[in-house]
Amino acid sequence: WLAAADLLCLPSLGEIFPGAILEAWSVGTPALVSDIPPLIELVTTVGGGRAAERTPEAMASAIVDLLADQPELRAMGKRGKDWWHANATPSSVAAQYAEVYTELMSDASRTR
């Protein structure tokens, strides 16, 4: 259903790093999220969506605005998908962990 959607709307009251956004980005679907700090940071850093005030009126207005601008909606979806491929696939996450472990082991061997 996410691949068929034009937009994911996630008006959360509390989130840290929601998997729903990653799932949407994995198929190129942009996200509209509520204006809580972790979500604002995620969508603005990646460029894969927008944040709106967590009220029915603000969310509805943002949905209408985003759906009216299909080129920007597609561009946000592409940015989200590109970020997901670089940072959130199982292989990219494993590579990031391996890099951290290698760095930690290197630091530990220098302090001995």
Image (spheres, rainbow, N blue to C red):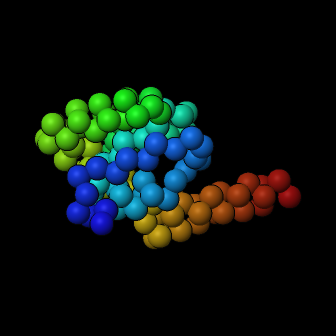
Task: Kindly tell me whether residue 13 is visible in this rendering.
Answer: yes
Q: Nearer the viewer, residue 87 or 63?
A: 63
Of the pair 60 and 87, the residue shown nearer to us? 60
Q: Residue furthest right?
A: 112
9 above or below 86?
above
Say which residue appears at 60% left-offset and 43% top-offset: 14
Residue 44 in sight: no
When the figure is inspected, residue 48 is found, relative to residue 59, above or below; the finding is below
* Above or below, comparing residue 106 to residue 94 in the picture: above
Q: Is residue 39 left or right of residue 79?
A: right
Residue in front for this viewpoint, 59 or 109: 59
Q: Quadrant of the N terminus?
A: bottom left
Q: Is residue 84 above or below residue 47?
A: below
Across and down, in percent, residue 16 comes to: 59, 47
Image quadrant assignment for residue 55 = top left
Residue lying at 66% horizontally and 63% vertically, measured from the top left: 101
Query: Residue sitting at 31 percent across and 62 percent down?
Result: 2
The location of residue 72, given as percent across then percent down, is 19, 38
The C terminus lies in quadrant: bottom right
